[in-house]
Amino acid sequence: MEHVASHHPWLVALEQSGLGAAMRQSLFLYPAVEVLHILGFVLLVGSIVGFDLRLLGLTRPLPVSPFARHAVPLAMTGFCIAVPAGLLLFATEATSIAVNPAFQVKLVCIAIGMANAALFHLGPWRSMAHWGVVSGVVPATARIGAAVSLLAWIGAVAGGRLIAYL
């Protein structure tokens, strides 16, 4: 803790804040926030996994565009629940969690997942309405993006779960 504290005083301040203390001391707050975090990433990752698997060829009869109109808002809702809840959980032990290798992997995977989603929306997403109409095939760039997405978000979940064990 001293090593992290000397380099990152904001972590100590966050951990020692009223918010960090409340999260640690309340009998119900931490478990409630953890349940919200889990529900958020279930919505996020569940929606993304379903969409990515569709892009990779699973359930081909299901049209991509309507699936996206359903899955993407669910994923965004899940992200908007998971992130604030995750920040609250982080505040409880910021100094030790920040140096946990599993947490660091989780953050890298989240960054890759978000960057991949942004690239997808800037690229393949723009022509999605035409997929299957012309060729019946999802473009290779979208399939590559789906594979990267699956790996990134599964990595984020695995990293998050492993925080308790490392």
Image: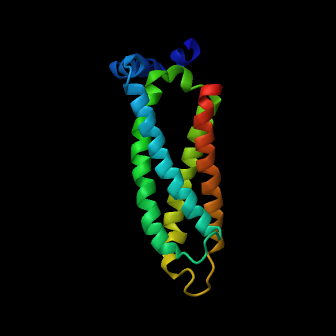
Query: In this rendering, is residue 136 above or below 104?
Result: below
Residue 151 in the image: state x and y as whole percent: 65, 52
Q: Is 73 above or below relative to 27?
A: below
> At 48% across and 79% down in the image, what residue appears?
129
Is 154 located above or below residue 104 in the figure? below
Q: Report the residue that reaches farthest toward the bottom.
A: 134
In front here: 114 or 43?
A: 43
Q: Is residue 148 visible?
A: yes
At 43% from the left and 49% from the top, the residue drawn is 78
Type of colouring: rainbow
In the rendered image, the residue lying farthest to the left is 18
Q: Is residue 160 left or right of residue 20?
A: right
Label total for image? 0
The residue located at (51%, 75%) in the rendering is: 128
Residue 63: image location, x then y, percent: 52, 76
Query: In which quadrant is the N terminus drawn?
Result: top right
Question: Looking at this view, is 27 or 76 the one in front?
Answer: 27
Could one spot residue 87 in this view of the protein?
no
Q: Quadrant of the C terminus?
A: top right
Residue at 55 percent of width and 46 percent of height: 111
